[in-house]
Image (cartoon, grey):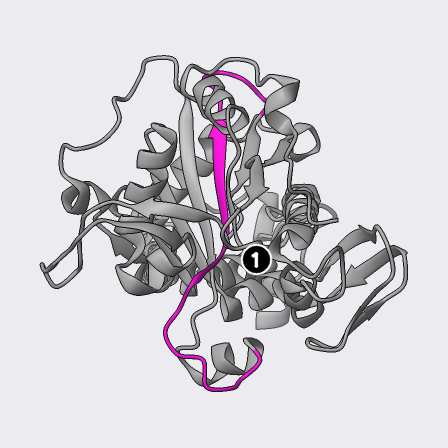
Amino acid sequence: MSHDAMTQGTHDGRPASGGGRKRRGSPRKRRRGLKITLSVLLILLLAAGGTVYWLYSRLDGNITGVDIDKALGDDRPEKLPTSGQNLLVLGSDSRAGAENKELGGGGNVSGARSDTAMVVHIPEGRSRAVAVSIPRDTLVTRPECTKADGSTVPSANRVMFNSVYSQVGPACVVKTVEKMSEVRIDHYLEINFAGFKDLVDAIGGVTVDVPQDIHDKSSGLDLAKGPHKLDGTESLAYVRTRHGIGDGSDLGRIGLQQQFLLALLSEVKSQDLLGSPAKSYKIASSATKSLTTDAGLASLTSLAEFARSMNGVDPGTMETIMLPVAYDKQDPNRVVAAQPQADDLWKAIRKDGTIPESAKKSPAMGG
């Protein structure tokens, strides 16, 4: 019988056989076919596993960790059973690297400062969260701190909050926040200029409702009142503008920063990241390569677990508050924590209680 006749199929696609009987392959051939199939599957699994491991290792290696617990020791507020989770989020204006320097406006600015600071409180077992912004021009008492090289920096009164980062480092920022609030900070997250820009570009931009016309000659930001979809560079200028809104101080832009944070979180949550692995990786790469965290979050696994623990938090219900401040009597260009409002705010967060309306009002509004 010719090769064509042997390979001619029946109506159901099975190979025809002489006499109409289906020939069964020999056990040796079946075993050989099974071995080939298993070998192919094994190769594919190993290849896929190698790719996944490579991607994981690359993302995991992007994250910089800071051992906050080791740096601070035992001189910290008590972790209360009802205190939920407290996260200190910093946006740093580091000029390290050409891209950061360009985004920061160039010039001869050296070092880095905590350009944006928020204490995010997530109550235990709830879906609501609150973000408290600390104005960077706030005068604070910096406690005695240990630098990364082991040297000790003495305590100092009336220092600008954002100078603590550049003078001593992130662990001292955490210690300063804990001393002023008596709130135990569980985790620390920091993202720099370039990382912020790339993250926004990776998700395709963020839409914000601009509350008033903004014309900032310093940053070049020019936006009319109303909704705008901002790319990474525009978003960075938006959260950093201070000359284009309010009284030109740091207080005026805090509302923009809080608004943008919620818009960014909502945008990330609304996207079908599982349906687009390539986009998910791009977003994860942008987020991690410029991210610094405490040692407890300094791995992709830890970050993923923490993110899952906050999955029930709806950005649309997150409350944003500025630390109540008053203009300093000695220097009107600086502010100090307003009392008793600030103490009432921190007390409510410590005890996971309701924040009084009086603690949400600031004598210095920056309007």
User: Where is residue 206 drawn, in percent x and y?
Assistant: 73, 56
Q: Nearer the viewer, residue 165 or 13?
A: 165
The residue that label 1 is drawn on is 333
* Quadrant including the N terminus: bottom right
Q: Is residue 274 above or below residue 81?
A: below
User: Where is residue 80 drawn, in percent x and y?
Assistant: 31, 16
Identify residue type, mark 1: Asn
Residue 34: in sight, yes or no? Answer: no
Q: In the displayed image of the protein, which residue is found farthest to the left? A: 150
* 272 relative position to 154: left or right: right
Q: Is residue 332 above or below residue 104?
A: above
Residue 308 is one of the magenta-drawn residues = no
Q: How many marks?
A: 1
As helix, strand or loop, the secondary structure at mark 1 comes to loop
Residue 123 is one of the magenta-drawn residues = yes
User: Where is residue 111 drawn, in percent x and y?
Assistant: 36, 74
Q: Residues within 10 Å of mark 1 (few under 14, many from 20)?
A: few
* 248 relative position to 179: left or right: right
The residue lying at 32 percent from left, 35 percent from top is: 178
Q: Quadrant of residue 221?
A: bottom right
* 320 relative position to 183: left or right: right
The residue lying at 65 percent from left, 35 percent from top is: 315
Q: Is residue 97 above or below residue 59?
A: below
Residue range highlighted in magenta: 105-128
Q: Quadrant of residue 186?
A: top left
User: Where is residue 312 drawn, in percent x and y?
Assistant: 57, 25
Most common secondary structure along the magenta stretch: loop
